[in-house]
Image (cartoon, rainbow, N blue to C red):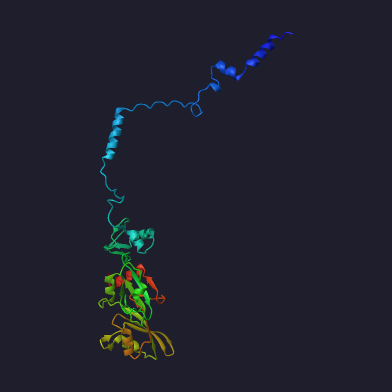
Amino acid sequence: MRSSGRNSNRNYRGAGNSRDDRQQSSGRPRPEERRYGSGGGPAPRKKRAAPARSREYDAQIEERNRARHDKPAGPRLPKTFGDQEGERLQKVLARAGLGSRRACEELIDQARVEVNGKIVTSQGRRVDADKDEIRVDGLTVATQSHLFFALNKPVGVVSSMEDPDGRQCLGDYVQNRETRLFHVGRLDTDTEGLILLTNHGELAHRLTHPKYGVTKGYLAAIQGPIPRDLGKRLKAGVELEDGYARADSFRVVQNTGRNYLVEVSLHEGRKHIVRRMLAEAGFPVDKLVRTRFGPIVLGDQKSGWLRRMTNTEVGRLMREVGL
């Protein structure tokens, strides 16, 4: 049987309708005929040539490089070069213990800070903490270069920073300090209580000089009964071998039977002055404690404890002696 032309044509188209025939007819290369690079992938595309730079642009680059390399070599200046000398006032106040820098800025805004006698009202003031006189509310600010301590000296401790006989002394309580400290005044070995230590030489000198008359307070344990006029006798003056000694004030703090605890205040600083006055009046002292030195009080500070004085305490001390 003879096949129709349609079927024969369909079979021909079906046999020739392959991907190879289409690629060949379209002119595209077969996969096995494509060219690949050495890496097995398609050949890389050619890069476009960069546009040529003008001579004027090359000259500008060369001039810029020459100027950069012609700069003189030397150490870099700090960012603060050219600023005013000294530290910012609020930083000095914060280091002295008056609060955070923000709180110290508020003190300045409130016109409570003085530098060399003039009130500072604007922020950014720079000061020299070692040379400028800084006050807050009229009290001198103690800078970091000065140290101020209050010690409750126990009985048996010698009032000196060193003792050649090896006895316990004040220096044993302030070891490992970077600066030398002075003790302000003295207490005999059998007397306990408040004694000040500082490296501020002028303050230590004025606190102990009779000219400034800084008052010290003592608690003395004596045996009674005592007459009512004992306070008047002590304030009027008691004659001692080195002259008269007078108390600024006297009062009975506690009385239990024959045991009396009395408070004596005076501004003299002679050796054993309180013991000698009471003994001359007929009442030897059994125990003596210094509880106050000017505006600084012992309070509940334990025996043998050393504490750093607050800036307010230091300011009051300095005002006491005109610093």
Residue at 31% x, 85% y: name it.
235
Compared with 5, 99 (above or below) is below
Residue reaching furthest to the right: 1
The answer to whether one can see residue 249 in this image is yes
> In this image, 95 relative to 209: left or right?
right
Compared with 131, 235 (above or below) is below
> In this image, 317 relative to 21: left or right?
left
Residue at 28% x, 71% y: name it.
203
- Give the image quarter of residue 101: bottom left
Residue 76 % position (x, y):
29, 48
Compared with 95, 68 (above or below) is above
Closest to the observer: 305 or 113?
305
Residue reaching furthest to the front: 38
- Give the image quarter of residue 58: top left
Residue 49 % position (x, y):
39, 26
Give the total number of marks visible in the rendering.
0
Image quadrant where one finds the N terminus: top right
> In this image, 145 relative to 48: left or right?
left
Closest to the observer: 195 or 174?
174
Residue at 40% x, 87% y: name it.
260
Closest to the observer: 69 or 187?
69
The answer to whether one can see residue 295 in this image is no
Residue reaching furthest to the top: 2
Compared with 54, 118 (above or below) is below
Image quadrant where one finds the C terminus: bottom left
Residue 290 % position (x, y):
36, 80
